[in-house]
Amino acid sequence: MNRTPRHCTAVGTTALLAALGSAVTSCGGGHPLAAAPYDAADDISFHAPTDKGGTADPDRPLDITADGDGRLTDVTAVDAAGRYVAGELSADGGRWHSTSPLASGARYTVRVSTEDEDGRPGRTDLTLRTGRPTTTKRLNVTFGPKKGEYGVGQPVVAELSAPVRDRAARAVVERALKVESTPAVAGAWHWVDDRKLHYRPEEYWPAHATIRARSALEGVRIGDRLRGGRSKPLRITTGDRLIALTDAAAHLMTVYRDGEAIKEIPVTTGKPGFETRNGVKVVLGKEYFVRMRGESIGIPRGSSDSYDLPVYYAARVTWSGEYVHAAPWSEGSQGSANVSHGCTGMSTGNAEWFFDTVQEGDIVKVVNSGGDTMAPFGNGFGDWNLDWRKWRAGSALVAGADAPHPDDRARLRPESL
């Protein structure tokens, strides 16, 4: 094969020579030849447009082409933080170009693998630094909930410091928001609105799992005049798999721990006109004492349905005021009739037990009520009331609701109630 040195860059500026550093010296034979694979620095052209400072422009793609009769077989580009750049290799191996944004102010190592006309493998490593963007606006990400232990129904929340409306920009953001769990379980982000995303698996989280969320957006171009900022990673854990299933028609709550029924509680739920919401809700918090007034849910003071009551052992499941709580005034109806204004009431002793047993993120599921289904968003965590196809349709990385999931074969499917 002709080993005559070929060009390493087609940018046509001396500034790039400083930007590429060791990548350029490799073209002059600076790298020692390896027995196998051979040094392929002379067999490629590397294009990286530079900015005025002589560093690679993070807003422009990288481009690598094969020279002569050889071809590219693989290209990987990764920065010092471990973030990989997505790219596309042509079918004939003649060209590779980056398809995802580069981070600003980063140092990248680009490994290029080649094959000559005789099938011998070659390889070379290039390095480059990207410059700082001219824009200063940063998109920061805040993960929730706060660090701690939660029930298996707790979604991970990502709140953005600025709205992101463009689908391509959303895809950049979503691709950089990483969630991992031990034991492993596949999940997906869902855009709740322009500033908020929720992440959940297809079924509930495994019990006693560790869940970590982090952002790899720092320095990454998201859109015009907008780049990713820093964010604090999140680590939470899950406790037992605790699910409280209320059958409103039977006036009975059954509490399950890890699939085993541990307690049955006579309850009363919403009466006609105030029916308790059906579906899956998540415990949002616990309040030992709450003063409940009818005005808070739109009941005029002085009407026959008006009330003003001190309530104890209250576990909140919606922001609009639905609780599971002690209701000693309705003990005569608990287990036999629905007489509340939408909450799930029980005896003080049972409410104290429930209050001490559940934690934030635990599941409260209601069936056979005349009420509407809990809304997915806006009034607590009704996320689990969307089936998996509709949930994934809220991802910017999914082309449509019926698109196949790349991790379907590996997804865990915990048994659900």
Image (spheres, rainbow, N blue to C red):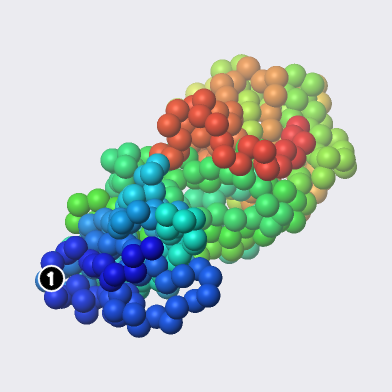
* Disc 1 residue crowd, few under 14, some 14–19, many 20+, Cα 10 Å: few
In this view of the protein, can residue 260 be seen by the observer? yes
Of the 4 image quadrants, the one containing the C terminus is: top right
Residue 174 pos. (x, y %): 42, 48
Q: Which residue is mark 1?
A: 13
Residue 265 placement, left or right of 12:
right
Q: Is residue 14 left or right of residue 284?
A: left
Give x and y (percent) for residue 114: 43, 59
Q: Nearer the viewer, residue 282 or 118?
A: 118
At 82% across and 45% down in the image, what residue appears? 258
Note whether 272 is above or below 129 in the view shown: above
Residue 387, located in which quarter of the rendered image? top right
- Above or below residue 56? Residue 238 is above
Up-down: is 174 above or below 387?
below
Query: The N terminus is located in which quarter?
Result: bottom left
At x 33% / y 51%, what residue is drawn? 95
Residue 269 appears left or right of 133: right
Q: Residue at x 51, y 34 (%)?
A: 392
Above or below, 105 relative to 84 = below
Kindly indicate the quadrant of the structure image that contains residue 230: bottom left
